[in-house]
Image (cartoon, helix red, strand yellow):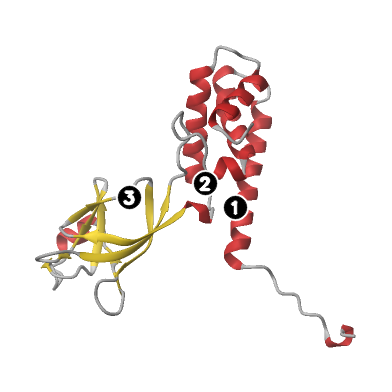
């Protein structure tokens, strides 16, 4: 079954007819995930933390974090948006709220958010909407939303990376099928994002 990590590995091994590639197959699934993390645009890669806590100058990224989609303070009236500054700008600017208070700006460095201000006591709460990695498959995490919905992307992605390593004659075909699967997922995500096109019939055709 292609809906589990073990089933995916077994199918890959059967297609390459190699019994000596167990570790390589796992590595190539990981490589396929890394590429899909860069290329996929699915809404399933979005997450929301509606109670993100800011209690100091820094706060660790959520697990699997890639980038911010929106970041707003919610513990004060008005759901105040925070603006991004580069680490260099954060260091240079003498913003009015620098130090203790409600943050207006955030930056990123060394796996953490950096804030221009933070509460003197207690904490501020924010709503963080962000893009995250696909939950990696493993012996402990045997499936995820992508494998369930799009097993072909995993299969052909892993076969492509494995094919490079073993010099398989089908590598170019697997690469083309992998690219096709990614393009299909991204087209589907675009339709979901923009909504279906409304077709209006001319009045002359209305019975």
Relative to 46, residue 136 above or below: above
Point out residue 84 in the picture as x, y percentages from the top left corner.
29, 63
Query: At 84% from the left edge and 87% from the top edge, which residue is drawn?
Result: 203
Point out residue 120 in the picture as x, y percentages from the top left corner.
9, 66
Element carrying mark 3: loop
Q: Is residue 45 left or right of residue 8?
A: left
How many neighbours does mark 1 have within 10 angstroms: few (below 14), some (14-19), or many (20 or more)? some
3 vs 1, front mark: 3
Badge 3 is on which residue?
62
Closest to the observer: 107 or 152? 152
Badge 2 is on which residue?
39
How many neighbours does mark 3 have within 10 angstroms: few (below 14), some (14-19), or many (20 or more)? some
Quarter containing the C terminus: bottom right
Quarter containing the N terminus: top right
- Gap in angstroms between the C-alphas marked 3 and 2: 20 Å
Query: At 61% from the left edge and 45% from the top edge, which residue is drawn?
Result: 149
Element carrying mark 1: helix
Query: At 77% from the left edge and 79% from the top edge, which residue is drawn?
Result: 200
Q: Are marks 1 and 2 in contact (CB under 8 Å)?
A: yes
| Mark linked to residue 186 | 1
Q: Earlier in the sequence, mark 3 or mark 2?
A: 2
Q: Are marks 3 and 1 in contact (CB under 8 Å)?
A: no
């Amino acid at each position: 079954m292609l809906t589990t990590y073990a089933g995916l590995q077994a199918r890959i091994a059967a297609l390459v007819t190699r019994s000596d590639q167990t570790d390589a197959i796992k590595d190539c699934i990981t490589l396929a995930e890394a590429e899909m993390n860069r290329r996929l645009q699915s809404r399933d890669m979005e997450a929301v933390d509606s109670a993100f806590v800011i209690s100091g100058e820094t706060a660790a990224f959520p697990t699997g974090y890639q980038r911010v989609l929106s970041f707003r303070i919610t513990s004060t009236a008005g759901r105040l948006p925070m603006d991004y500054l580069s680490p260099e700008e954060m260091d240079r600017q003498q913003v009015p709220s620098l130090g203790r208070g409600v943050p207006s700006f955030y930056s990123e460095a060394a796996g953490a958010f950096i804030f221009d201000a933070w509460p003197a006591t207690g904490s501020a709460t924010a709503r963080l909407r962000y893009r995250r990695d696909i939950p990696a498959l493993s012996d402990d995490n045997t499936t995820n939303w992508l494998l369930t919905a799009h097993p072909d992307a995993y299969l052909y992605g892993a076969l492509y990376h494995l094919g490079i390593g073993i010099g398989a004659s089908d590598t170019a075909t697997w690469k083309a099928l992998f690219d096709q699967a990614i393009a299909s997922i991204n087209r589907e995500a675009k339709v979901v994002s923009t909504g279906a096109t409304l077709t209006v019939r001319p009045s002359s055709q209305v019975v």
